[in-house]
Image (cartoon, rainbow, N blue to C red):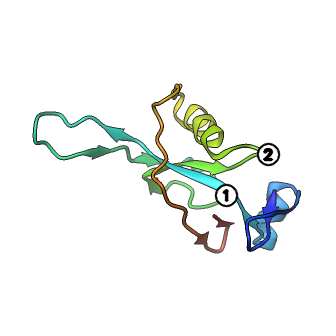
Amino acid sequence: EFLEDDDRVAGLVPRLVATRRKLRCRGVGVLIFGAPAAEGAPLRVLCHRRSEFKASYPGRWDVLVGGLSRPGEASDATATREVAEELGLDAGPGQLRHMGFAVEVEDKAVRCR
């Protein structure tokens, strides 16, 4: 799905078309936090290396797991699916929490909200 500026769905195109045309799409980014190693220890955040075969930023280090939502897919469902696809983890009910904000991401490869 690609979106109008007011977040209404404007239409449906293949991902490659959306990327090439820099159409606005809906996606998610998930931060994975680890439990502190000991009382008072700093919070840990998972950092992973992107596949060398990714279209954008191949081989780079990243703290977000995520991607574009499928047509009609809710954000929480997208987050659960992406964590399973990218990390092989089953994020059951209550394990993922919405951080309460949305951001615009725009670069040479993608334009998301």
Expressed as whole percent of the image width and height from the top left, the position of residue 105 reads 58, 69
Q: Which residue is mark 1?
A: 55
Spatial CA span between label 1 and label 2:
24 Å
Expressed as whole percent of the image width and height from the top left, the position of residue 40 reads 10, 42
Q: Residue at x 81, y 47 (%)?
A: 71
Q: Quadrant of residue 61?
A: bottom left
- Residue kind at label 2, given as amino acid type: Gly
Asked if residue 40 lies left or right of residue 52, the reply is: left
Badge 1 marks a residue whose secondary structure is loop
Q: Quadrant of the C terminus?
A: bottom right
Q: Quadrant of the N terminus?
A: bottom right
Badge 2 marks a residue whose secondary structure is loop
Asked if residue 23 lies left or right of residue 63, the reply is: right
Q: Earlier in the sequence, mark 1 or mark 2?
A: 1
Q: Closest to the observer: 16 or 102?
A: 102
Q: Residue at x 45, y 52 (%)?
A: 99
Q: Residue at x 79, y 45 (%)?
A: 72
- Residue kind at label 1, given as amino acid type: Ala
Q: Which residue is mark 2?
A: 72
Residue 53 appears in view:
no
